[in-house]
Image: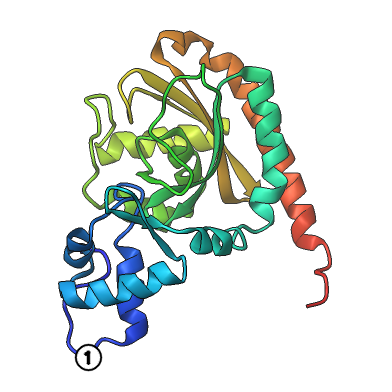
């Protein structure tokens, strides 16, 4: 349960974090009752904490009575992105400009991919990824691109767990997935065909720094255009290389005095 189960003697900080932790990409708007259920706290406690968070603009009440993350948290969140998003953004925009397709940047967080940036247009195929959203690694192009370049122990640990099957085309057999990850590592990019969402396919390449995958760049297109995927691989690889160089330079640059 998000926010943790009911516990006696929880600190005020843990209770506030439990309230905020009730919100996620699948639950961006919640009623007080839903917050109480997902945070594992009494409704009266949640009512008091939400009132304080609303006064501080950490949460905002919508006209329908549900709450969502407020401007103050959004403002604080803008301080979080490091040099990766900053240096990658121009290259993502260039990739979108040259292809007209959905482009996104993702990092690995545990056994999931976390989408940290996205550039898309109204004519591009709708996709399930969203900035701040998470998806499993094995059905996604960016996830495969990241996982293939992780140490063997990480791959083995991932393959040892039950693998979700979002569509009938998702590869969930550990041996078959392991073979595909080796192929991804050999050729330097990953492709998927309706493994995360029916009707779409993707290609992705890792952003490598000293051989370590710090992120992955991906493009998603309609399955009707699957034959065009190969022509998109080279632009993706080029952009991933540019982001890698820019990120390495940013890390090596002297930090301004605090």
| Residue wearing tag 1 | 9
The relative height of residue 251 versus residue 4 in the rendered view (above or below) is above
Residue 96: percent from left, percent from top: 63, 25
Q: What colour scheme has been applied to the protein in the rendered image?
A: rainbow
Q: How many marks?
A: 1
Quadrant in the picture for residue 51: bottom left
Residue 132: percent from left, percent from top: 46, 49
Asked whether, in this view, residue 256 is left or right of residue 198, the answer is: right
Which residue occupies 21% across, 48% down? 162
Nearest the viewer among 183 and 191 is 191
The relative height of residue 223 versus residue 52 in the rendered view (above or below) is above
Q: Residue furthest bottom?
A: 9
Quadrant in the picture for residue 249: bottom right
Nearest the viewer among 193 and 37 is 37
How many C-alpha atoms fall within 10 Å of the one at disc 1: few (<14), some, or many (≥20)?
A: few
Residue 223 makes an appearance in the image: yes
The relative height of residue 235 versus residue 118 in the rendered view (above or below) is above
Residue 237: percent from left, percent from top: 65, 30
Asked whether, in this view, residue 117 is left or right of residue 64, the answer is: right
Q: Secondary structure at mark 1?
A: loop
Asked whether, in this view, residue 251 is left or right of residue 6, the answer is: right
Q: Quadrant for the N terminus, please.
A: bottom left
Q: Residue furthest front?
A: 63
The relative height of residue 253 versus residue 15 in the rendered view (above or below) is above
Which residue occupies 78% across, 78% down? 258
Nearest the viewer among 51 and 221 is 51
Which residue occupies 37% across, 53% down? 111
Residue 210 makes an appearance in the image: no
Nearest the viewer among 58 and 177 is 58
Which residue occupies 59% across, 23% down? 233
Residue 210: percent from left, percent from top: 67, 54
């Amino acid at each position: 349960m998000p926010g943790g189960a009911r516990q006696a003697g929880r600190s005020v900080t843990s209770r506030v974090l439990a309230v905020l932790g009730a919100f996620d990409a699948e639950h961006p708007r919640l009623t007080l009752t839903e917050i109480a259920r997902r945070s594992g706290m009494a409704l009266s406690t949640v009512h008091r904490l939400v009132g304080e968070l609303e006064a501080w603009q950490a949460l905002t009440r919508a006209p329908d009575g549900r709450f969502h993350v407020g401007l103050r948290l959004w403002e604080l969140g803008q301080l979080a992105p490091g040099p990766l998003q900053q240096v990658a953004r121009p290259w993502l925009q260039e990739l979108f400009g040259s292809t007209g397709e959905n482009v996104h940047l993702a990092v690995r967080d545990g056994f999931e991919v976390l989408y940290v940036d996205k550039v898309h247009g109204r004519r591009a195929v709708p996709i399930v990824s969203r900035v701040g959203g998470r998806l499993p690694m094995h059905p996604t192009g960016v996830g495969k691109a990241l996982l293939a370049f992780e140490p063997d122990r990480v791959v083995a640990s991932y393959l040892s767990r039950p693998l979700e099957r979002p569509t009938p085309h998702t590869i969930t057999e550990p041996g078959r997935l392991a073979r595909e990850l080796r192929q991804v590592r050999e050729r330097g990019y990953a492709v998927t065909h309706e493994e995360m969402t029916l009707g779409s396919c993707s290609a992705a390449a890792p952003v490598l720094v000293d051989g370590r995958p710090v992120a992955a760049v991906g493009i998603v297109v309609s399955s009707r255009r699957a034959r065009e995927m190969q022509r998109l691989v080279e632009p993706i690889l080029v952009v991933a290389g540019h982001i890698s160089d820019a990120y390495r330079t940013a890390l090596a640059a002297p930090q301004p005095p605090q």
